[in-house]
Image: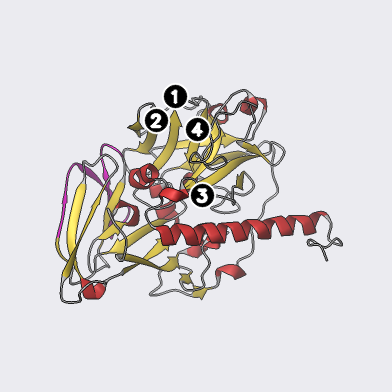
Amino acid sequence: MFSKDLMTPVSFSCACGQVRGSAKVPNSLLPLSYSLCHCNVCRHQTGLLCGSYVTLVKGTSDFKVEGSYTPYYSSDLVTRYFCKNCGANVWLDDKREDGPDICSGAFDNVDGIVKLKNHIFIEDTKDGGLSKWIPDEDITAWSAFSRDSTRIRIADRARTTVAKNEDAKLSAHCRCNGVQFRITRPNEASKALSAPWPDLLKPYHSQAPQNKEEVKWWLRSDDARYLAGLCACKSCRLASGFDIQAWAFVPKANIFQLDGKPLDFTMGTLEYYESAPGVYRNFCGRCGATVFWHCHERPDLVDVSVGLLDAPEGARAESWLEWQTGRISFEEAAQNEDLIARLGKGLGRWGNEQHTSALKTLNPLRPTTEP
C-alpha cells in the first residue's frame, strides 16, 4: 500500500536506454487509469492493434525526459515522441490533457501504478480489433473519446467479413506513409523456406524450437491465410513502447514495395535497431511506427506489425490472418501480468467462439457439443 501523504517516483525508458524519463506522482492518485486506444492514427503510428497511454495527471511533479528522441506531430493537438535509435514510442503531449501521456509499456514498473479503465475509438476498427479479446466486464468501451462519445458493448459488435479475392493484395503503411508495402496471398513461394517454431506455438521455456519435420506453420486455413499472434516479451514491449505487440508471420517472398519490387529493409523511411545479435527491428524513422521483425536464423520469414494493415473487413484482417488464440508469446515474461492474463483469457474465449461458429456454418443441424 502507498501512503497517501507521499509521492511515488515513476520512471520509464526505451529499449536501448538512450531515452529515459521520470516523474513523481501523489499516492492519492494511484493507480493511474489508462485506455487502450484503437483509433486509426494510433494503429498506424504505433504499428500495433492499439496504443495505450497513461496520463501523468495534475499533481504530478518533476517530470523530465532525457536522451535523443524524435517528435512526430500527428495532429495540431498531439505530438508523439520516439527514440531515434531504437524506434520505441515513449510519450506524447496532448494539449487537451492535464499532463504528458506515457506509453504504458515504457514504464520500468507498473505494479500499483496503472490500471486499465477504457477502450476508446472502437468504431475505427470496424471489427472491434483487439477489444474483442479483453472482455468489458469491468472496463468501459467507447466509440471515440470517453468524454464525448457513445458507450458501446463490445460483445454486440458483429464480425465483419469480406469475400476473399485470390488476386487481391493487402496494403500496409505507417501513419506518415514513409513506409508503404503490399502483401500477396500465400503461394508456392510461401512454402519454399524453413523456419524454427516460434514461442507462440512451441513455448521456449518447455521445448526446443527446432522444426525437424519442416512444418510450414506460418501458413493456415489450408494455406490460404497467414498465422498471426500476440507477444508480451520484454524486448517487444520496450521496442514498441506498449504492452501488446501483434505480429503476422509472412514470407519475405510475399511482401512487395508499391512499385512491385521485392521487400527491401532500407526502403522509404525504414530504420533498424538490432535488439539482439542477428535480430533486427525495423521502424519508421519519421513517425516511429513498428514495422518488421526479422533475424538471421529465419531470414526468409518476416514478422509484420499488424496495426499497419488496411484490410477492408477491419483491424484484425481476418480474411488474411488466422489468429493463434491458445497462447500469447512469452506471456510468462509479461510485465503487466493482470493485463496479459485478462487478454489471454479473452483471446481463448474468442477462439472457442470462432470454432463453434465455424462448426455451425459447416453443419447447422449438428450440435457443437456432445449431449
Tell which tag, 3 or 1, sits nearer the viewer.
3
Query: Which amino acid type is shown beneath numbered disc 1?
Result: His
Query: Which amino acid type is shown beneath numbered disc 4?
Result: Val
**Residue located beneath label 4 in the image:** 302
In the rendered image, the vertical position of residue 18 relative to residue 298, given as above or below: below
**Residue located beneath label 2 in the image:** 279
Quarter holding the C terminus? Answer: bottom right
User: Which residue is at the front of the view, 4 or 83?
Assistant: 4
Tell which tag, 3 or 4, sits nearer the viewer.
3
Query: How far separated are the C-alphas under marks 4 and 2?
Result: 11 Å
- The outermost residue toward the left is 62
The location of residue 288, given as percent across then percent down, is 33, 43
Instruction: Assign a secondary structure to mark 3.
Output: loop
**Between discs 2 and 1, the one toward the N terminus:** 2
Query: How far separated are the C-alphas under marks 2 and 3?
Result: 20 Å
- The outermost residue toward the right is 365
Query: Which amino acid type is shown beneath numbered disc 3?
Result: Ile
Query: Which amino acid type is shown beneath numbered disc 2?
Result: Val
Quarter holding the N terminus? Answer: bottom left
* 52 left or right of 4 in image: right
**Residue located beneath label 3 in the image:** 328
**Between discs 3 and 1, the one toward the N terminus:** 1
Who's the residue at 23% across and 42% down the image? 17
In the rendered image, the vertical position of residue 367 relative to residue 270, given as above or below: below
Instruction: Assign a secondary structure to mark 2.
Output: strand
